[in-house]
Image (tube, coloured by chain):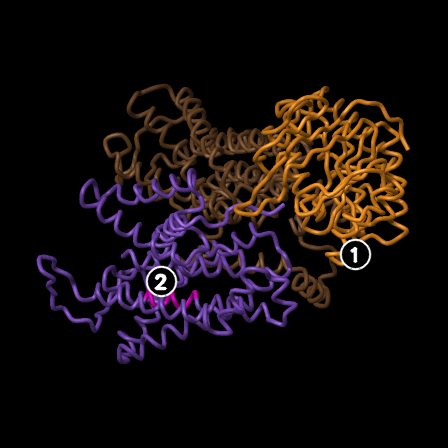
Chain colours: A orange, B purple, C brown
Amino acid sequence: MSSMTNDSVLRLEGLTKRFGGLVAVNNVSFDVQEGQIFALIGPNGSGKTTVINLITGIYPIDSGTVRFLGEPIEGLPSHRICWRGIARTFQNLRALPAQTVFENALLGKGYGKEGVGIWHTVLHSARYKEERAHNNEEIDEILEFVGLSDVRNERASQLPYGRQRILEIARALVTKPKLLLLDEPAAGLNSQEIHTLMELISSINERGISVLLIEHRMEVVGNLADWVFVLNHGAKVAEGTFDVIKEDPAVIQAYLGKGGK
Amino acid sequence: MGVIYSMLALGISLIWNASGLFNFAQGDLLTLGGYFMLTFFSMLKLPWGLAFALSVVLMGIVGYALSQIYFYPMISNRVNPQIILIGTVAFSVFLRNLVLVVWGSTPKTYSHPFGKQVLRFGKVFVMPHIIWIVGITVVLLIILQYFLRRTMVGTAMRAVAQRQVAAWLMGIRNDRMIALTFLLSTSIAAVAGVLIPAILPLTPSMGGMLQMKAMAAVVIGGLGSFSGALVGGIAVGVSEAIFATLVNPAYRDIFVFGVLVFFLLFRPGGIFRAQVSEKV
Amino acid sequence: MARLKALRRSYAPLLLGIFLLVAPHVMSHYQFYVLQKGVQTAIHVLGLLILIGYTGMLSLGSAALLATGAYTYGILSVKLGLSPWLCAVAAVVFTTVVGTALAFPSFRLAGPFLVVTTVGFGEIVRILILNLEPVTGGAYGLAGFQNLLPTNMWVYHLMLVVLLLVAIGTERLGKSRIGLALKAIRQDEIAAEVMGVNVKRAKVVAFALSAMLAGVSGVFLANLTGYMSPDSFTGAESTTFLLMVVISGMNSAVAAIVSSIILTWLPEVLRFLASSRLLVYALILLVYLRINWVPSTKAAVTDLIRKLGFGKAGASGESQVGRG
């Protein structure tokens, strides 16, 4: 568990999104504290990924506000949101298959915010070489931290599924986030891999990065989450600590209706 | 001309709906169909009806083969759609030059059985072949609608179009369905190709311009929407004719492109609001 | 095996360079002309490597940009009588501006729609050139402009220098962080954006760079042929350029140069096929795509090649694109 201060890292208020006639996210409000591991759970189709897509600017918001570190971020383009300090992984694995592990991680450095421009790159100037060495070091350190150093120069497509997930997390870490959004990171992993994943998330959290976790596997949620928010049909069902939530009749009902946990 | 564009647009929409591929070679498929007809009708002197049927069937086979040998394997292997797109472009170039090599570059034409007698509706003079072309197209569309909505096969095709994996799990053979889609598309292109020499002479490179206009029709009407294809095609055909007569024939094509670009920028979904964005 | 590949990689540029330097002296006048056209095209294709190969913005209208460069140079020289170098610079700048305008549609439009737009753009330019006779000479073409340098050999060497610089630049760009960002846009635009890549800005840069190179290439084209007409800048030409990039594997500058030269040469070598050169190109491309990108077929073919005794255990040439 991590230290809890009272600063809100991410605050959603009245977030709403409609797709045609369907209300995907309905007036959702919650607060992620600094240093927390915040779990967002709910049956399939309850709108969890949509919430993340709204936060990261992939879908435009219909109404409501999103505040990151006190500043509103609705309407900002996704890359700016990333620059502010929010990083995410994807439910359906979006690593670049043709690039190596190292290159995938390097992508986290982005383009347009900092770093040398085209001139320097093409001329291989001193500044460029310096930046490159610096990036190499930084990325190697992160790869080491997540345990991917041994496959640094392999194509991402060659990695087993579980390690590709870790690669996505590594890539997200390169962006130096203050908040990490993980969309079902444990999906498709075996128990050994899940164990590694949980340890990784813990260590990330210990470094001071807040985590918003969407997850289905209850052992992960139970073990890691400081706070749980339950979503169904786009609307809040309940929120609280895991022990409280799992007894909550409304929550059980929501899951039971879809086949139980 | 409008309905010719519509037919091409329909073919493009069909393939798009079924497989997510945008067929750049549709115009050139029309050309091929037209040249087949030329061979059967003018060169082999077969009766018009028979030649028509043969051309359409032959083109259908081409479509089927295309799908089985070339496109379906790419789709099922999840090849980057951009690459497949380049593939259709390459195919269009291939067809164009094939026609050039086999049939030569001089414009060809052949007669049609619709009669030369000019018909008169009140004050309007209409050439009979136009009525026939429009008529055949409308009939074709009705048959198609019926096929897609009412028959088992048609429904299966639509199922594949909407959810490939689900359809597969339900026991529908995706490759057959997509092959069928291609077959239909090429056949429709063939019909258009057979009818078109009544208006324009056949040249190997006519596919390019027709493709452009068809793409404009598709965009304007909405990609993936069949009624959109129809409306879009007619819209393009009519407006380009009006523009040519009123303003300046040389710039007619620029006008069409201008409209196309306009739509792309401001209303990519077209009139019938087709799906443009990607699911994350 | 890896050593063979690495060996080939480092020697290929050297061999290419030697070839380009020596060839003119051992070739006939006509062959040399074809080689020059190849080099000139290579400059343009390198620009396309950045735009299409790295960034994935499929453009079938690049011939129009080439035309813009060539015609601007020609018109400024003939009609305004400006000094050739001034015309060249103006042509490149103008082409860059025009080409960059194409970046904006690319913000909103995906795959086929973008291609359609670029084709439309290409056609519009061609029709404009055709119809604005007083300025461009219309179908009769444009001639009579001055050359940059006194002799053909001078121009050739200048082109080689430019080609070398551009090739180095493109390679370096490709292997850099920025290059990676571009390649990411091609493979997964949304993921790139979410990871902090300013996609819009990157696209603008890609379009600008490739337009600039098209402009340069256009100026050289004017110098090489002394005459230009709208027929040389059709959609078919754009498609050929696209082909050159795709066949080269979309990843390496050297490969792009080689494929440009070879594909420029092919029609001459295949004289007996005359008008069907595009047919052959297209067929080559179709076969290539089908084999290279569908893993099962690729495995079968590489197996076959091995059985026939051509030993190489590795996959196709320079391409590291895989399922790109």
Residue C50 against residue C305 in the figure, above or below: above
Residue density around tag 2, few if under 14, some if 14–19, many if 20 or more, within 10 Å: many
For residue A260, the mark is 1
Q: Amino acid at mark 1?
A: Gly
Residue C249 against residue B184 in the figure, above or below: above
Which chain is disc 2 placed on?
B
Q: Is residue B187 magenta?
A: yes
Which percent across, then down, holds residue A90?
A: 71, 43
Which percent across, then down, holds residue A208?
A: 85, 27
Magenta residues, as a range?
A: B185-193
- Of the residues tagged 1 and 2, which is closer to the observer? 1
Residue B252 sits in quarter: top left
- Specify the farthest residue to the left: B123
Q: Is residue A51 visible?
A: yes
Residue B14 against residue A43 in the figure, above or below: below
- Specify the farthest residue to the front: A249
Residue at the image position 66 percent from the left and 61 percent from the top? C298
For residue C193, the mark is none
For residue B31, the mark is 2
CA distance separating discs 1 and 2: 58 Å
1 and 2 marks on the same chain: no
